[in-house]
Image: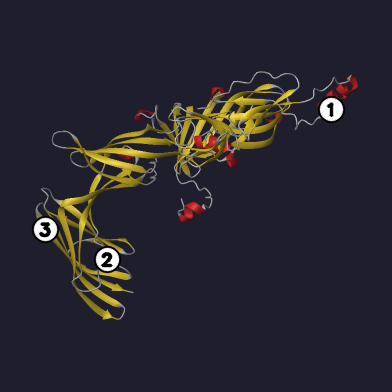
Amino acid sequence: MVKIPTPPSIPPSGWEVKNNSDRGNIMMKYIKPIGLISLPVLIVLIVIMFLIPGSIIAGPQVTTTFDDQTFMAVTIYNDGTGLVKDTREIELPRAEFDLIFMDVASRMDPTSVHFVNETDPDSLTILEQNYEYDLVSTAALYEAHIDNHIEIRTEDGRTIDGILLSYDGNLVIQTRSGINIINNPVEVTFDDLPEGLITRPTLRWSLISSRDMTAECEMSYLTDGLGWEANYVAIVGQNDDVLDLSGWVTINNNSGTAYYDAELKLVAGEVHRVKQYDYECEYGEDTEEIPCDTGYDAGFVEESFFEYHLYTLQRPATVLNNQQKQISLLEGEGIGVEKLFIFDPGYAYYYSGDTAEAEIEVRLNFMNSEENELGIPIPAGLIRVYKEDSSGSLQFIGEDRVDHTPKDEEIEILMGEAFDIVGERVVMDRREIRYDTWEYDVKVTIRNHKTEDVEIIYWDHVWGDWEVLRSTTEYSQKDASTVEFIIPVESDGETVLNYTIRRQW
């Protein structure tokens, strides 16, 4: 609690009121009254006052707050950075003055600030910029009042007044009767708010304006604490061949200020920023529019922007400090999807009898194309998948994180592991053909306990130069070190694949 003390009564002429900080009380000292000043001396003093440089005499101050805003725009990047453009209508005097620009982000980067008078850019000269962020807090008030007078009320109702000597959780007070250590005071009264402590982060400019005007001034800056991510919900049809997709943007604002009725833009893509070296962290000491008929008018419009994609909300949005806000990004229905079963037991060719058992992965793949009822750049994010059970209730069946995906590219969702399908691979024999060449006989067994037929995609990873000498089913080369087999397995049945690989290094 900060109290403004009642000013003392005016002392008699010739007396000066002084605060005796050593004893914590007010004392008066008599000073000989100054006689009348002669007229010539008075004239000289007046002339000197007019000749004092302007830097000594404090110029006017102009203060601007949220109330002066005429436009606010916020662009948010994936890495937690935000670009803020704050336009305000400000009365500028024809003078050298200080502009106090309040209500800015406490996590702003002061080196990124750009200020311009949009009404008349050439009429304003910037001399100096200061970012003031020493905010009022309990600890800051105590630290600023060391060696100064404070008044304390204790739990037992006593009032103690004296000089604050130190603060480390307890208060050490010098009073007339001695030194007191106070723990958990009920109320503390300070004489005033120390110079330098402010209630809100503030930018202060020293400016020169060549004329009086009402100006539209834009201040832009980068700040940490603003981030966004995409979240998707997919509902799979009963036959696992179509899905409906909805996307949401989740915006987090921990930048230290609010943004009212802002034009909101989101940038998808990895923007390179130079990272400052942080010793403590290191060592752990502490424009293609979305079609109107898809329901995007109230949401975001997407466009290509440099090597990224820009999503612009088609209405103003207010994002409060320490708020998480969700806004609809996209809607798609009847998207064709394919369910895949993948058996990938890894590499195991060290000796005969090598056995590898692995769970069968289940994946959902679909094309991000207009032909498939989608066809827009998809920002990276978390996708959660649901499906209706026999009673019509939605059940959660898996989730995965998708990368930034351009249109006409495939999106793959890892759903989990198949419960009713078992895969096993065994190296039956290995033969040395010569010192750098070996042959391997491999047996793969797939058992399907489901009530429908399935196809299993089996991957074998082979190092070096290799070729398949023989196989009981078709295969293809997936990449330089992977051979792919498609293994059909009937309902409640078993399929055995035998093949021989020759490997050379």
Question: What's the distance in space between the residues labelled 1 and 3, CA to CA?
Answer: 106 Å
Q: Callout 3: helix, strand or loop?
A: strand
- Residue 347 seen in the figure: yes
Residue type pointed to by label 1: Ile
Residue corresponding to mark 3: 494
Amino acid, disc 2 = Tyr
Q: Position of residue 467 (x, y in %)?
A: 28, 69
302 horizontally vs 399: left or right = right
Mark 2 → mark 1, Cα distance in angstroms: 91 Å
Query: Of tags 2 and 1, which is closer to the observer?
Result: 1
Between 396 and 427, the residue placed more toward the observer is 396
Q: Indicate the position of residue 349 as horizontal and vertical percent values.
A: 25, 70
- Judged left or right of residue 485, residue 140 is right
Labels 2 and 3 touching (C-beta < 8 A): no
Reading the image, the residue beneath label 1 is 48
Considering depth in this image, is 196 or 53 the residue closer to the camera? 196
- For numbered disc 2, what is the local secondary structure? loop
How far, Cα to Cα, is label 2 from label 3? 23 Å
Read off the residue under disc 2. Answer: 347
Q: Nearer the viewer, mark 2 or mark 3?
A: 2
Q: Residue at x 23, y 49 (%)?
A: 416
Above or below, 267 against 438 in this view is above
Residue located at (63% from left, 20% from top)? 8
Residue type for callout 3: Glu
What residue is at 48 percent from the left and 55 percent from the top?
282
Residue 214 image offset from top left, x and y in percent: 65, 21
